[in-house]
Structures are given as C-alpha cells and as structure tokens.
Amino acid sequence: MSGRFYDVIIVGAGPAGSYIAYELASRGHNVGVFEQRSVLETNTCCTGIISTECFCSLELSPELVLTKVNSAKFFPPSGKYLRLQTENVQAYVVNRLLLDKALASKAQSQGAQYFYSSPVIDVIPGKDSIQVEALCSRASEIFSARAVVLANGFRPKLPKKLGLGKIKSFLIGAQAEVEAKDVGELEVYFSQKIAPGGFAWLVPTCVGTSPNKAYVGLLATSQAKLHLQKFLNNLFSQSKITSREVKIEQKAIPVGTLARSYRDRILVIGDAAGQVKPTTGGGIYFGHLGARIAARVLDEALHSDNLTADRLSRYQKEWKAKMGRELSRGYWARRAYAKLGDRQIEAIFNALDPNGLAKALLKPDNFSFDWHSRFILAILRHSSAYPWLKIRRLLLREASL
C-alpha cells in the first residue's frame, strides 16, 4: 500500500526527532514522524537528567521536573564519598515520558503528523524523492518524502545499509525504578567491580513523598543487567532502597560518532549519529544541538530544492565544529578510565579531596554540566598524581595543550 507524500519524514519521536519535527513544521514544511513505540510507552533506561541550559533551550514546562540537582555524592570503590554542592541548580531530573509527549505535542501543534506503533523497516533513496517503508497497523506501507531524518536512536542497521558507516564502540546502559529510603540527592558510584568500564547511579525522583522513588542504573561494557542486579542487592543491604525485585530496562549507547551523518536527501541526528556524551552516555542535549543545526541546514536545502550530499554536508561540518572536539576528548577520557583499576580510581579521589581541588573545579570557568572536557582538563592541569598519567598521555595531545 502506498501512503502520502511529505517534505520530510522523521524516523523516531524521541527528543531530537520531535524537536526537528517542530522546527521544520513551524517553518511551513509538511512533516511526518514515525515512531515504533506506542504513544503511552517510554524507555526507562534514561534518567532524564538535563542541564538548566538544555531545559531552557527546549522551553520546557516546570511541570516536567521531578527534582532539581545542585549537589551530588561521588563514591569511590572504598565507599568514602566526596560530596560537591553548588549554590545554583545545575540540572533537572525530568519525566522522560512527559518530555517526549511535550515535544511531540509541540511539533503536532505546528502540523507535524505522528505515526505511533509504526516502526520503519526500510529507507529507499531515489533520484527525485526517497521512500520509507513502515509497519502501520501491522501492514507494510510505503511513504515518500523529499528528505528523511534518522533520529531513531542507536540502531546501526539502517545507517550501515545507507552507506553511512557503523558506530562500532558502545556501552550497555541498564536502569530500574525503585522505592528508596532517605536518599535526598544524586549519588554516583565509580568502581570496576560495580560497573566495569562505566559507573553507577542512584537518582531520587520523588523526594519527600511516601514512598520515595529513585532511578538506579549503570553503564558497563557488558552484562549490564547482571551488574545492576548485584548493585541493587548491595543498595538493598544498605537500606538505601526498599525494593530490589524490579523490572530492569537496558539499551546500547554509542561511544563514538558515525563516519557520515548525511548523504543525498538524508541526515542523521542524536544517538543515531553518535551525538552522545561519551563520559556519561547522556544524549538529550547534544542530540538537541544536532537537531537544531540539522533543522536550519535542511530548511535551507528544501527551499533551494538542493538536497544533494554536497549541500547537506554543511550539517556535519557545523555539528562537528560545535561539539566534535568535546566528543573526541570525552571518548579518549572514557577509554583511559576504562583501563584504570579500583586502586587507581581510589587514588584519584584521594588526590582530589585533601587539596580542596574538588571545590576549585566547580568554578564556572572549569565546570559545565554538558561540556565535560573543561572539567577533565582542569583536573589534568591541577594534578600530577600517578593515576592521571595514563589519562594525560591520551588526552593532552588531543586537547592541544
């Protein structure tokens, strides 16, 4: 069955996909958005932590905020934590289901048409248009468009088929919602035994209610569900959480970027392009930046009726200029961290606390919730301790210091 024709088809209705749908629809383009989830589903593998800058840029309602973040406890393997606090709110934990709905509603208000429970199974480029095959009500339908934007998360099959390459490096994120007890602020755990190659978190989402709710999750190189279950058991034994038999969600998170995020009539944004912080796996803000750049480039290309790869290559040049160096530094920092043992991680914490270095790093010039390389490089400048030597060798060349 053949469906209708659009100026642009967006594959994926996450934050990046709905944002670009809104931008393009508000500029007069006919936009169709295809999402494999139903309208009521959400993937709880995302904590929904976003910076105040991202929150304001997305123009979100305060009703989406579950809790505000201006302090955190950082736990090394020994458990002797380091607590940091700032005067101002640094981030918000937002309800991801409501976030997705709010951004979709905004796009729909400008005329974007949404197809939920409609996974895209193929994209077929043509000379004068591009076809998208989707399963709508379990029946295959073909839709046509002048251009397609892939915003469907880290799913390597389509980009590879379209000759855009494949992101080979990734981590596994796992998360569960639990009932918590007396957890009033963000907790982050660093240990290769808890989360090999990554870290774990306990994020309160409903403080002051009965019972308290929290997200518990981790990033790991493999067996994330198994490691998370062990971590849940550990938190339960410490009486930090009151439930451990919970549903665990997991997903792959790219570490690295797509070789090409464009071709004739096609752009790739968000997790699909690798626009994800390699240090934390967070993708909402960088995906938003990529979507904003893509919307402008694609709008100009549509108006000039020039949707060639040469014209659309401006998108990759611009987003690489905006965040490429940050992603590269984060990638090398993650590689270096993955090679550290728990003794070295412990030594890093010991080097931070006694000299007041941790507080110095929270100065505005050094700290940003989204741009982590400034924080990392400030640490490198201030410390000559042995655990940093591996990181120095990998990062200083990249940072051109």
Image: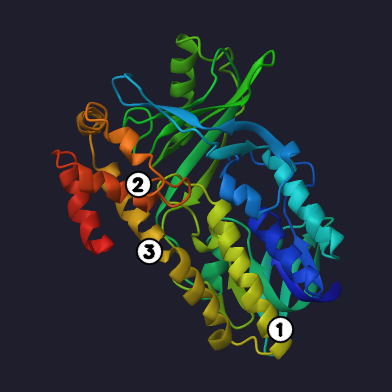
For image coordinates 24% across by 43% down, the residue present is 339
Q: What's the residue type where badge 2 is placed? A: Phe
Q: Does dot 2 land on a helix, a strand or a loop? A: helix
The percent position of residue 29, horizontal first and vertical second, equals 79, 75
Q: Which mark is residue 375?
A: 2
The residue drawn where x is 65% and y is 41% is 43
Viewer-proximal residue among 197 and 276: 276
Label 3: how many residues lie within 10 Å, few (<14), some (14-19) or many (20+)?
some
Label 3 and label 2: CA atoms lie apart by: 14 Å
Question: Residue 237: horizontal and vertical position, in percent?
Answer: 46, 10
Q: Classify 10 Å Cα crowding around label 2: few (below 14), some (14-19), many (20 and above).
A: some
Instruction: Give the mark toward the camera: 3 or 2.
Output: 2
Residue 20 seen in render: yes
Q: Are marks 2 and 1 in contact (CB under 8 Å)?
A: no
Say left or right for 87 vs 210. left
Q: Nearer the viewer, mark 3 or mark 1?
A: 3
User: Where is mark 3, residue-wise?
Assistant: 325
